Amino acid sequence: MKNGKVRFGVVVFPGSNCDHDAYHVCGKLLGQDAVFLWHKEHSLQQSDVVILPGGFSYGDYLRCGAIARFSPVMREVAAFAADGGLVIGICNGFQILVEAGLLPGVLLRNASLRFVCRHVHLRVENAFTPFTGQYAPGEVLTVPIAHGDGNYFVDDSTLRELASNGQVVFRYCDAAGVTSPEANPNGSLAHIAGIVNSSGNVLGMMPHPERASDPLLGYTDGWRVFASLVEHIESRVVPDRHLAGARV
């Protein structure tokens, strides 16, 4: 933190189209410090949280995220995550995280083989991560999606590991919180919409919480993903005037 504010670094790749959305939520709506990080940079500019936003990095050539994972900034992101730094990848950012090996699995073409753009319901599976602290377990959210390759897949042993470790953070569901093929917009295995790594500091999710944060858009369920991060980071600052700025 700097000057009492959490710094969000928003990575910008050629083809990113949700970078300004994330910047707006963190910098304007939350009143925190937000900076853009160009994909060729070798510095995260002292960010407390790094966001890999949605879009079509490098035109989605080869595979979604397959080229972006080689951008210079990703070396810094990987080192940051390995040191416990908080990273969130949204949509294309999730695809980049799995390509970079920071999250397990792969994101395949939607089962319908069509690009899907609409609001969906998500059930909060794990409310005890840095990204979900302001949600209740089992809470149902309304958040938009916009992707053609959101069909999450892992092998059976990895799926069991994700479930047993509490790494599944969001699942697609209906308005009542019930999972079903009809409520799953892309065929994702076990209706998975978002996961964290085994250490819990890297989140990947296909839905767009930044597009459900501003009241002007009519939906605000996604706002608490970012507010949870602020709360988590602020809670690590020792509130003792003799230890101002120290962390635990």
Image: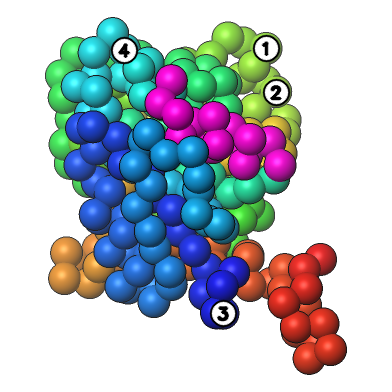
Amino acid marked by disc 1: Ser
Residue, disc 1: 157
Q: Which picture quadrant has residue 244?
A: bottom right
Sequence order check: which comes first, mark 4 or mark 3? 3
Pointer 1 or 4: first along the chain: 4
Going by the numbered disc 2, the residue's amino acid type is Glu
Secondary element at image label 1: helix
Q: Are marks 1 and 2 in contact (CB under 8 Å)?
A: yes
Work out how far the residue at label 3 is from the one at label 1, CA to CA, in angstroms. Answer: 43 Å
Residue 25 in percent (x, y) is at: 32, 64
Label 3 neighbourhood size at 10 Å, few (<14), some (14-19), many (20+)? few
Marker count (numbered): 4
Q: CA distance from mark 4 to mark 2?
A: 26 Å
Q: Quadrant of the C terminus?
A: bottom right
Which residue carries the number 2 mark?
A: 161
Q: Considering depth in this image, is 182 or 112 the residue closer to the camera? A: 112
Secondary element at image label 4: loop
Tell me the kind of residue under disc 3.
Gly
Q: Residue at x 63, y 72 (%)?
A: 234
